[in-house]
Amino acid sequence: MPSNPLSERPPIIEQLRAESRGLPLRPAKRSRQEPSRPSPEDCRRMFTIENGNRWLELARREPEAKMLFGELWHQGELCMLFADTNIGKSVLAVQLGESIARGQSIAPFTCQAPPARVLYIDFELSQSQFGLRYTKDKEDHQFSDNFFRAQYNFIPDPPPNVNENELLIAAIEYKVKQAKATVLIIDNITCLRGGTENSAVALALMKSLKALKNDHNLSILVLAHTPKRRNATQPISADDLHGSKLLINFADSAFAIGKSTLDNDLCYLKQIKQRNTRQRYGHDNVCLCRIQKPGAFLYFKFEDYSAERHHLLSRSTADRRQLADKIATLSAADLSQRNIARQLGISPATVNRLIRCADVQMRECADEEGCADMQMHGCADGEECANNLMTNDVMPNDQNADALMTNNQNGSAPMTNDIMTNDQHADSPMTNDVMTNDQKASQHVKFNPEYDRKTSTIDKLLTPELLDQILQTTTHEKASAQIPPLPPGYHDPTSAKQP
């Protein structure tokens, strides 16, 4: 069958024909190349088939995978370490590389492997930044001779028609051979991707790392990030690894670093995925640790075990922070405190209190228990919150009722709640925010608004010693009289009669 003559014309002829006709040149469509069928040899090598007993026999011949970092990372594994920004991933990674290079354990995590050559690919720190971490008073930390660090050099003009990820993997493979390394640490995976949110990109990347591991018998640790807005009230899980789910699906093991809300400097390690061992450091047994630098070496020091739930952000604190953020946004828009309160459905006193608590120092210690109580009680200047007379906005109902009864017994001036209506305020000025009418009735606490108002006046006019005496008298006589006797010479401006 003769071929189509139009398809065989040279491009210059097609251009002349188009110009003579006054038509734009339309290049001929390229014919699609049919994919070649795989050869039988390629199909034969792709899979190895044996029966189950044969596989068990082959498994016994292989050396046992030894621990590199306790149950968290074993020899021959592709392991993922992920955490939020600026928590200490790189610090722990360098500490791991140094311990494996020396064949020493990081208590309480066992290192069963002998000293090995470690290659640390650093995409994060510059030369000076790395030096600052491991130098103190002009004294340098002496790293093991088996620890090698490779720093990334930006190439402005990469080779044309070459995929950047493939170029990086090839360069890493070259340096692995040069250093004769058996352990590879990559900090971090962000520099090895064109967007790990894309499943195809993540799959290609993990396949490349798997092939690198198998070809050179490597143990690989890859550092990664968590999403920017991770929910701090929820435990860390595999879903918190930033990017496609294929990243952790193809990994042999994974663990994460979490931030404790009890202490800004306290972190915890949690085991996320494992294949060569059982889970030991799960949600009920995380490892508490803290970054220290007593000498020239920056490292994590293990402190204790704990349950993860104790170090998560409580719901009430999270809601209060969200409310504070909304108030800050509206305040930045030049809205008055009354308008902010009306828009958010809270009282102006709450708006004022949260604005005062938005001080920089208060934000720095907002996760600490004492400062959380201080914010809840409205202590803006750091004074003791135990003597504050205001009830907690987020206390459980039973605790609020106990606090209210104590305030009534002590004769302290009650603080009206932020979100109560005016009718509720008139009926019960010390009623809890979240208590129902049935719960209020069950407390059997009777309040006298007139007594409360007069006590507030006494607090303003009398000395503390005389006020204590009056309150003590009130405590003894409260069963027979609702209004305590007033001192001689005291004039009640709201009463027509003199006491």
Image (cartoon, rainbow, N blue to C red):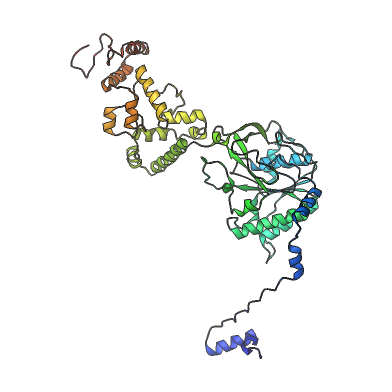
- Image quarter (top left, top right, bottom left or bottom right) of the C terminus: top left
Q: Which residue lies furthest to the left in this view?
A: 496
Q: Tell me which residue sits at (78%, 54%) in the image.
A: 54
- Left or right for 172, reference 464: right
**Residue 156 in view (yes/no):** no
Q: Nearer the viewer, residue 145 or 210?
A: 210
Query: Residue 230: horizontal and vertical position, in percent?
Result: 53, 45
Query: Residue 269: horizontal and vertical position, in percent?
Result: 63, 38
Q: Tell me which residue sits at (58%, 34%) in the image.
A: 307
- Image quarter (top left, top right, bottom left or bottom right) of the N terminus: bottom right
Q: Which of 157 and 426 is in front in this view?
A: 426
Q: Tell me which residue sits at (76%, 64%) in the image.
A: 45
Query: Residue 348: horizontal and vertical position, in percent?
Result: 34, 35
* Number of disc labels: 0
Residue 411 quadrant: top left
Q: Is residue 491 above or below residue 176?
A: above
Q: Tell me which residue sits at (23%, 16%) in the image.
A: 492
- Left or right for 377, reference 187: left
Q: Which of 313 and 195 is in front in this view?
A: 313
Query: Residue 347: horizontal and vertical position, in percent?
Result: 34, 35
**Residue 111 in view (yes/no):** yes
Q: In this view, does 449 lie above or below 265?
A: above
Q: In this view, does 420 lie above or below 83?
A: above
- Left or right for 162, reference 226: right
